[in-house]
Amino acid sequence: MRLNQLSVTNFRCYSQKTFNFHPQFNLIVGQNASGKTAVLDAASVAIASWLIGFKKTKDKKNLEKTDATLTYVEREGEAQFIEAWPVAISAAGSVNNNDISWERSKESPTGNTRYGNAAELTALARQCDQQLSEEIPLPLISYYGTMRLWQDPRAAKSSRNKKTPIFSDNVKPSRLDAYNHSVDPRIASKELVSWFAKQEWQAFQLGQEPMMLTVVRNAVLNCIENASYLRFDPKRGELLLTFKDGKRQPFNMLSDGQRCVLALVADIAQKAAILNPHFGEQVLELTEGVVLIDELDLHLHPRWQRHIIEDLRITFPKIQFICTTHSPFLIQSLRSNEELIMLDGLAPAQLANKTLSDIAVGVMDVNSPDTSSRYAEMKGVATEYLKTLDEAKSAPEDKLQQFKERLADSIAPYDDNPAFQAFLEMQRVVQLGE
């Protein structure tokens, strides 16, 4: 699956907007409240349309009443929000080498989400649903939000589900299991751990490690610096990561950045392995799909930010990534300006060899990125102080005290920097006296 184009009507902050996507990597940048997450939410509705054609999938994501664009108006002296209808999401892309377009819409607050204009997409899905026993490719779809690590999609379910044994065989495995929670922005971490546990139990029983376990483990090790081995620890009931220096850390003791990347990469790799086991050891190289990630730089050190995109490209070469970020390091690591989607202004002609300062000013609209905002503020205050001092020298005697008070007030907020204050006060004494 690929998303080539996404159009939204009356969706969240967009009354009408069209986005074009690069087939490999897309990085959406913009200021807070510019609509970055809204683009991902709209894309998740679009890719979730694929699930409608499968009888046993549950995550058929719908448009909600709260998705409608709001307009603040005053009528007859009363202020209120007016919802804009209909809400529609249109997409164009490809699935299994078929170029198609589809649409999901909601006509009113109480209406159902329509998918009549997604007939071609759902027909392809139904065809795949009937051929699951055959070695047909299934596209991977997944959405990871900013709270992906801290909430579990299963948390709100019954206590019966919470107590299900980790090695339970009550449910027969299916390739469609990989579509469970696929457009829920939270990672089903308990299911991920359970999958590792079952795979390692199978390895113990057979005396040989399942190929898919090796594939998923290697994907994680390729994306976490200095990691050498990943396994399930039955005593702790969680994953255990070993580093090249021999140090071992359980998942809950890792840094937030390490946990975010480990869970995200393992989840994508595990889904690919479940969807397309017939690809064997090449499953990650051959599985296509769309993965949405909100704030890809979440909890990552700048050094890690500089290569996380390339790590994902290499590990999942046929996956189309659509991500948001506030990090200039991620922007700097893109291969071309065609992979950058700017919600504020236009992307520069090229990103190659751009410095962080160039990106901060030209892409992220940050003034004077080489210095702190406080330093720039103090520099401005000092300039105005000296200008006022020049005016004060020629002022009449009865106005001199007012000038001195203005000068004192202007540097009063910087009492944490006595050297700054002392220097300017010395200038005042030289020019005006005590």
Image (spheres, helix red, strand yellow):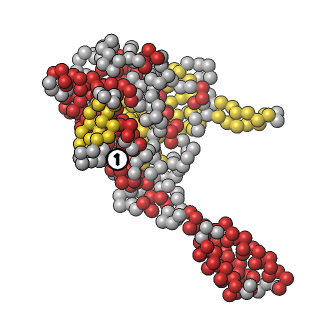
Q: Residue at x 35, y 37 (%)?
A: 251
Q: Residue at x 52, y 34 (%)?
A: 8
Q: In the figure, 64 relative to 250: above or below? A: above
Residue toward you, 75 or 414: 414
Estimate how packed mark 1 is, as few (under 14), some (14 to 19) or many (20 or more) residues with alpha carbons within 10 Å: many
- The amino acid on which the numbered mark 1 sits, given as a three-letter code, is Ile
In the displayed structure image, the side of residue 389 where residue 119 appears, left or right: left
Residue toward you, 250 or 203: 250
Residue toward you, 274 or 289: 274
Q: Residue at x 80, y 76 (%)?
A: 402
Which percent across, then down, holds residue 377? 60, 67
Q: In the figure, 368 relative to 289: above or below? A: below
Q: Residue at x 29, y 31 (%)?
A: 233
Give the structural element (helix, strand or loop) at label 1: helix
- Residue 374 shows up from this direction: yes
Which percent across, then down, holds residue 116? 48, 19
Q: In the figure, 400 relative to 320: above or below? A: below
Residue toward you, 386 or 85: 386
The quarter in which the C terminus is drawn is bottom right
Which percent across, then down, holds residue 174? 30, 17
Q: Residue furthest front?
A: 235
Q: Quadrant of residue 260?
A: top left
